[in-house]
Amino acid sequence: MNLKIVSKDSIHVVGVEYVGENKNDEIKEMWGQFNAIMNTISNQQVPMKACYGVCYMLPEDTNPGTFRYIAGVETKSLNDIPQGMKGITIPAGKYAVFTHKGKLDTLHQTYANIYSNASISDANWMISSSFLSSIRFFTKSMFNFS
């Protein structure tokens, strides 16, 4: 898996939200649930190229280890969000992009690789520089269900 630093325009993502520590692999289960209902999102960007995993925290999230995660798709706006789903605007900026290709049940391996030294060895310069504080992370997922 290669780390890719890109400049992105802002995008809207709508999907299902998880709040917690993912101690029991809840995010993997959430992706399965999302895939079953993603067609209910009416204003998806067409053609859909990927699903997005967006990890973020809000100022009121004060419990260490707890984070928010949306499994979603890019939409044209945050209008008409289906009941039970959330929307978020990812601001324009520089991002570290990791692409997961494969089956849903291997998604945890992608995340493990993101945080292991092996996956970021190409970007060790980034860890010791001030550039790290100016980038954001998200995953772009292309699942193979066969």
Image (cartoon, rainbow, N blue to C red):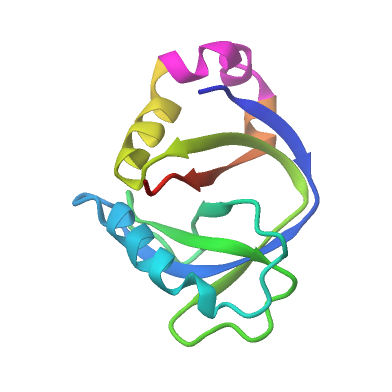
Q: Is residue 17 left or right of residue 2?
A: left
Q: Residue at x 49, y 57 (%)?
A: 57
Q: Quadrant of residue 61?
A: bottom left
Q: Hey, which residue is sitting farthest front in the picture?
A: 146
Quarter where residue 48 is shown:
bottom right
Tell me if residue 45 comes above or below residue 27 in the rendering: below
- Residue at 47% across / 60% down in the picture? 71
Within the magenta stretch, is there residue 126?
A: yes
Q: Which residue occupies 68% across, 25% down?
A: 130
Expressed as whole percent of the image width and height from the top left, the position of residue 142 reads 52, 45
Q: Is residue 7 above or below residue 48?
A: above
Report the side of 80 relative to 120 (left or right): right
Of residue 41 and residue 70, the one placed in the foreground of this image is 41
- 46 lies above or below 84: above
For image coordinates 55% across by 54% down, the residue present is: 51
Q: Is residue 65 magenta?
A: no
Residue stretch in magenta: 118-130
The one of 57 and 137 positioned closer to us in this rendering: 137
Is 1 on the left-hand or right-hand side of 128? left
Relative to residue 9, is residue 54 drawn left or right?
left
Q: Quadrant of residue 136?
A: top right
Work out whether residue 21 or residue 133 is closer to the camera in this orientation and state it.
21
Return the x and y of residue 105 as percentages of the image width and height.
29, 44
Picture layout, residue 124 above or below residue 63: above
Mainly helix, strand or loop, the magenta region?
Answer: helix
Query: Number of numbered discs present?
Result: 0
